[in-house]
Amino acid sequence: MSGGWLAFWDKPHAIYVNVRHKDVHYRLIAAEIAALVPSRQARVLDYGCGEALRADVVAAACAELLLCDGAPSVRAGLAARFAGDGKIRVLAPDAVELLPHHSLDFIVLHSVAQYLTTAELQSLFATFRRLIARGGVLLVSDILAPQLSAAADVEALLRFAAVNGFLLAALGGLARTLFSDYRRLRVRYGLTHYGEADMLQTLAAAGFTGERAAKNIGHNQARLAFVARPR
Ligand SMILES: C[S@@+](CC[C@H](N)C(=O)[O-])C[C@H]1O[C@@H](n2cnc3c(N)ncnc32)[C@H](O)[C@@H]1O
């Protein structure tokens, strides 16, 4: 499943309906992640970070920011964009596996879990448990609850678009999505959904104590977020 989705993210796609959408998306995510960084000394990992256009905002709030994405072309773009930022390093998933134990204070997994099987997420949480420092924090966000419909995602996007001045482009983008690879992959592989109890149990099985956060990161408050700490 994740191989099919990764191939999608590794190629040009139209998930962001225009430049304005991509810009406001990454600004919002970066500002909200930066606000959750536990301290200026924190070593932070954003796993499955995508293009992370405003990673500089997160880097400014911490000591070191590791950006990891499974798609090689996304990593190449990140490496080029942040080559001049001494606080930011771009890593492949294999390199994350090799990081020293307990070397990270804050790990973010935002809008990634839905593209992984449950077994893949369990394995990733085991890696995070090894890497997280005592007292560190894991944020798992943009989780699709079992009852969440595609219509709820559409409604959230249209509200976000209306407030940020790209409503017409969003309507056009949604029409294009109906005929896109994203739609074909969604039918073929699906997206993995988690209820609150399922996610808390998956975190617990990996050695984390989690709780549902009051608010999701990003524009879609119909999706769930969890904050977890190592037991
Ligand atoms: C929906 S995007 C989210 C990007 C970013 N976190 C955000 O919210 O803007 C999902 C990202 O997860 C990455 N991804 C998917 N499966 C992955 C995996 N198994 N390992 C690492 N990255 C993965 C994709 O390449 C893609 O960039």
Image (tube, helix red, strand yellow):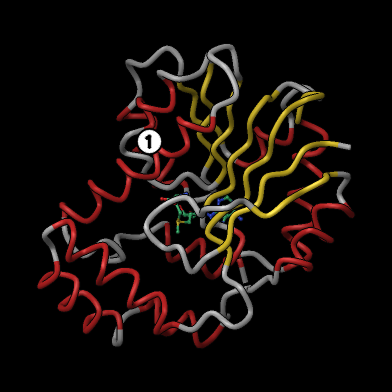
Q: Is residue 81 above or below residue 14?
A: above
Q: Is residue 127 left or right of residue 93?
A: right
State the residue position of label 1: 31
Q: How many labels, in total? A: 1
Q: Quadrant of the N terminus?
A: bottom right
Identity of the amino acid at label 1?
Ala
Q: Is residue 31 above or below residue 219?
A: above
* Residue 89 on image: x %, y %: 49, 24
Nearest to the observer: residue 61 or residue 64:
61
Q: Is residue 108 above or below residue 171?
A: above
Residue located farthest toward the front when viewing the structure as drawn: 214
Q: Is residue 33 left or right of residue 30?
A: right
Q: Is residue 116 left or right of residue 29?
A: right
* Residue 191 on image: x %, y %: 57, 75
Residue 197 location, quadrant: bottom right
* Residue 112 on image: x %, y %: 55, 57
- Residue shown at 19% from the left, 71% from the top: 170
Q: Is residue 194 above or below residue 213?
A: below
Nearest to the observer: residue 231 or residue 15:
231
- Residue shown at 44% from the left, 82% from the top: 150
- Residue shown at 30% from the left, 30% from the top: 81
Mark 1, Cα crowd under 10 Å, few <14 / some 14-19 / many 20+, is: some
Q: Is residue 148 left or right of residue 120?
A: left
Residue 51 location, quadrant: top left
Q: Quadrant of the C terminus?
A: top right
- Residue shown at 37% from the left, 58% from the top: 219
